[in-house]
Image (cartoon, grey):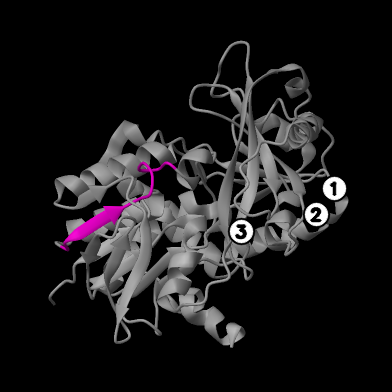
Amino acid sequence: MTLPDVVVVGAGIVGASAAWELAGRGAQVTLVDAGEVSGGTTGLGEGNVLCSDKDAGPELELARLGLARYDAIEAELGEVARIRRKGALIVHPREDTWAAEPARAARLRAAGVEAELLDPEAVRAVEPGLTGALHGATRVPGDLQCDPRAIARALAAAAARLGARVRTHCRVEHVQVDGGRVAGVRLAGGEVLGAGAVVVAAGPWSRELCEDAGVPLPLEPRKGQLVQLALPAPDPDAIRHKVVDGSYLLSVVDPGSGLQLSSVVETTWEGHVVVGSSRERRGFDLTVDEAVGAAMVERAATLFPALAGLRRMRAWAGLRPWLPDHLPAIGPSERVAGLWVATGHEGAGVALGPITGLLVAQGLCGEPAAFDFAPLRPDRFARVAG
């Protein structure tokens, strides 16, 4: 088939992956971002690729494919990707979340995810510093951590070597539609980039472009904060797993806009400690709330008491692209021919970014897709909007 010229809007891990996959298939691609490559949401998270925090359904199916896709990323990029296959622990200080965990772990295993239930003694055997009170945990050894900013930048560079154009500091103001079909995009300043297909992969900034093109998308930014603590002797293995409080699973799917706190703890590549997690919907506010950071560290210290005395190195905030049904929007629009959407991954953008890029490229190039787009179709909100 004749491949269309494609403009990919957004150079985070989703957009960079799509550009790389498309360029590798011979498409003429322009990757455009209002800032730097990986200058937004991608570069601000912990870099986790997790199945452990999912439950049965389309997101878990996609996450399994996403985790496997990191084999190709590691083969392409090598040490640049900083992949650490350290696994994850979903720990349960609360009795109510632990009561539901055996059934969830069984659903993970039924979906093909290796998952084992551990009693408190077994938890401390695999994670000695985790001395806070627990009912138990689920261990998922296949989960990994990576450097998403480095990966997105390396994939954008690889796409450029394959012939893609990468244009940074170019803000897309408008998706041009002619007769129900995408015709290109207009940049701030008036320049028009003609294209037979446009992929909107601008994370929390995607809504305006989609709705401008005629596709309702109730996407909102969901703010999250992180705090980095300094270990006196930096050690990447001081905490061996990604450790997630079971209440985190509830906060992810909570529909409310108010502040939600839960504990996630892990080490960085350099050997310090990152602590989260917060969630709240308050627009594009990136202000760091010192009280929220202090509360996150205090909660994390109930799991790892040694964290209480560590020096705080820095704190920052980022924006997750949130959709109300807690599934991403991936695939072609039925309302506007040539418009593809790849956003709404919320806190799983790193895990699902490379597989999303692959799926978009497969669809645009007429290949059989590795995943059924149906539950993720971006037009699913049009009926709700009327």
Residue 216 lies left or right of residue 314; in this view the side is: left
Residue located beneath label 1 in the image: 94
Residue located beneath label 3 in the image: 54
Q: Which residues are magenta?
A: 27-39
> Foreground residue, 268 or 370?
268
Q: Label 1's element? A: loop
- Please tell me how crowded label 2 is: few (under 14), some (14-19), or many (20+) other residues with Cα within 10 Å: some
Give the residue type that dot 2 points to. Thr
Asked if the residue at tag 1 contacts the one at tag 2, i.e. Cβ–Cβ closer than 8 Å, the answer is yes
Asked if the residue at tag 3 contacts the one at tag 1, i.e. Cβ–Cβ closer than 8 Å, the answer is no
Q: Residue at x 63, y 47 (%)?
A: 285
Q: Label 2's element? A: helix
Work out whether 289 lies above or below 262: above
User: Residue 382's x, y, as percent?
Assistant: 53, 83
Residue located beneath label 2 in the image: 97
First of labels 1, 3 by sequence position: 3
First of labels 2, 3 by sequence position: 3
User: Residue 200's x, y, as percent?
Assistant: 39, 64
Residue 65 within the magenta-colored segment of the rendering? no
Give the residue type that dot 1 points to. Arg
- Please tell me how crowded label 1 is: few (under 14), some (14-19), or many (20+) other residues with Cα within 10 Å: some
Give the residue type that dot 3 points to. Lys
